Image (cartoon, rainbow, N blue to C red):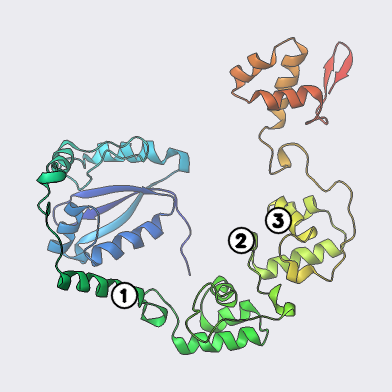
Amino acid sequence: MAKEKVCGIYKIENLVNSKVYIGQSKDINMRFLGHKSVLRRNKHGNEYLQRAWNKYGEDKFIFEILEECLLNDLDLNEIKWINKYNTLDTNFGYNIESGGNKLKTLSEKTKKKISENHADVSGENNPFYGKKHDQETLKRIHSNGNRIKSITAENNFHTKLTNDEVLSIKDKIRNGESAVDIASLFNISKYNIYDIANNKSWTSIGGLIELPETLKQQYKFNHANKQIDEQTAKNIIELLIQGIGNKEISEELNIKLSIIEGIRYKKIWRHLTNDIIFPSVKNNRAKGSKNGNSVLNENQVILIKQRLRDGWRICEISKDMNIHKDLICNIKTGKTWKHIEIEKMGKLYC
């Protein structure tokens, strides 16, 4: 079972000399897998960490989460932990940058190394200047290019399927079996099945798939469908058939309102709703901050309306509250937030 996503700061520690590498990620567990993968293949971008890994071995390193934090706080927190462990100093750590994707700077040692490795090799300074490849070298280059192109289908080490399994999958697709059932049988994602059915992958095995019109909709891939699984979509459809409003379903199932509306108006999961006519429900869209598209909350709107009542100019409110002028203008003219009312000289100001 996949581990829960953890956003924050982590460290990789060498148990032999206590040197540390500090990093940040919005999914730390996946980042750990990435580090281990490239380190095991001797392909890590940090040569100091890679050399230590090669010297001491994988069992001498531990991966730990230092702090969980919000996505917007990653940069500053990474810098904080790098400074705390002093990992830019090669006596204490393996970091070659100060941290923070937007704020990072290179260590002086790294800057010097880059400078030395990027000397001017243009024109006559290039050791290959004035030379040409001989015919034998050109043939070898051409041969290597063709070899790379031939790494397809099950010869590709990234693939999870064999050629025989793909042939079986294509037969099941042509027979109209569910993408979910096929994916479960072969222990792969249903989106791999969609790719095969739509000739986006494995076209070299078993020929192209030509689906009849009755099956095209079933295997039509829509990125919006990825946000929920098929069983959840069926649950939503059942509630819509019962006449329950979009807003109520959204709150009950804790699913974005836009997804509920997409199913109701047959923009997504169409192969499940083609033959269904949903009963109409008046005023489905949520108001105010309950609307997933809302930028403001009720308290901000009340303050804006009070200031408009008190004679503030739109540009003054915009600057003071760091809110775009168009949003304030729409509130003033009643295009938005009409349901929020305040008193104005004994009358209601909407």
In the rendered view, tell whether residue 29 sits above or below residue 181: above
At label 1, the amino acid type is Asn
Q: Report which residue position mark 3 lands on.
A: 259
User: Which amino acid type corresponds to the residue marked 3 in the rendered image?
Assistant: Ile
Q: Is residue 156 left or right of residue 252?
A: left
In front: mark 3 or mark 1? 1
Mark 2 and mark 3 residues within 8 Å of each other at the beta carbon: no
Say how many tags the image has. 3
- Tag 2: residue type? His
The mark nearer the N terminus, 2 or 1, is: 1
Res. 223 mark: 2
Residue shown at 89%/12% (left/top)? 346
- Quarter of the image containing the C terminus? top right
Q: Quadrant of residue 131?
A: bottom left
Q: Position of residue 255 (x, y in %)?
A: 68, 55
Q: CA distance from mark 2 to mark 3?
A: 12 Å
Name the residue rendered at 21%, 39% in the picture: 86
Report which residue position mark 1 lands on.
Answer: 146
Q: What is the CA distance from the residue labelled 2 to the residue labelled 1? A: 34 Å
Percent coordinates x, y for residue 24 in the rendering: 36, 47
Does any portion of residue 121 appear in the rendered image? no
Q: Are marks 2 and 1 in contact (CB under 8 Å)?
A: no
Kindly state the secondary structure of the residue where label 3 is placed: helix
Which mark is in front, 2 or 1? Answer: 1
Horizontal and vertical percent position of residue 177: 66, 84
Question: At numbered mark 1, what does the secondary structure look like: helix, strand or loop?
Answer: helix
Distance, label 3 to label 1, CA atoms, is 45 Å
Question: Measuring 57% from the left and 85% from the top, which residue is drawn there?
Answer: 170
Asked if labels 1 and 3 touch by Cβ distance under 8 angstroms, the answer is: no
Height in image: 16 above or below 330?
Answer: below
